[in-house]
Amino acid sequence: MENERVETTAADSGDTKPETKTWSDISAGERHRMIAEAAYFKAKERGFRGGSPLEDWLAAEAEIDEFLGIPSKKETQDLAAYQRMRQELVRILAGVGDTINVET
């Protein structure tokens, strides 16, 4: 999955042009802060009653990662499985190519 771009403003320079960042430019601490803030607002929306802090956190984490364009664990696992399958198919087809000739 490509590094999607997130626009942020450059507060230090006073520049109003958006600064473009990729998800790989976001530090782990900044991502953590974003997730914590989103989880807080989920709890606040329901008046801090009921629900589960863990469920809020996991939902917020999924939302933030999707927003940042960070591949999910499932997407990463699916891609790895696809790459293994493709390598195995290439290996098999290479062996078949050695046994097939014009007369076959």
Image (cartoon, grey):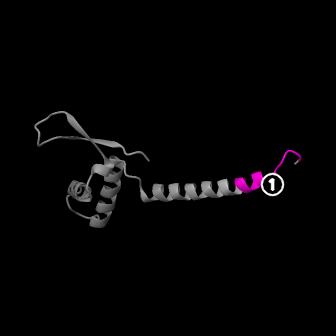
Query: Vertical placement of 84 versus 16: above or below?
Result: below
Between 93 and 81, which is closer to the camera in this rendering?
93
Residue pointed to by mark 1: 99
Between 33 and 98, which is closer to the camera in this rendering?
98
Query: Is residue 43 found left or right of 100 in the rendered image?
Result: left
Query: Is residue 8 found left or right of 75 in the rendered image?
Result: left
Magenta-colored stretch includes residue 97: yes
Residue 60 rendering spot, x and y as whole percentages: 30, 56
Residue 25 rendering spot, x and y as whole percentages: 28, 50
Query: Vertical placement of 8 versus 32: above or below?
Result: above
Estimate how packed mark 1 is, as few (under 14), some (14 to 19) or many (20 or more) residues with alpha carbons within 10 Å: few
Residue 59 rendering spot, x and y as whole percentages: 33, 57
Between 43 and 16, which is closer to the camera in this rendering?
16
Magenta-colored stretch includes residue 55: no
Between 39 and 80, which is closer to the camera in this rendering?
80
> Residue sitting at 23 percent across and 55 percent down?
30
User: Which picture quadrant has residue 41?
Assistant: bottom left
The range drawn in magenta is 93-103
User: Which picture quadrant has residue 62?
Assistant: bottom left
Query: Is residue 4 found left or right of 100 in the rendered image?
Result: left
Q: Which SS does the magenta portion mostly show? A: helix
Labels in figure, total: 1
Say what amino acid the circle numbered 1 marks: Thr
The residue lying furthest to the top in this view is 17
Residue 44 rendering spot, x and y as whole percentages: 20, 56
Local SS, label 1: helix
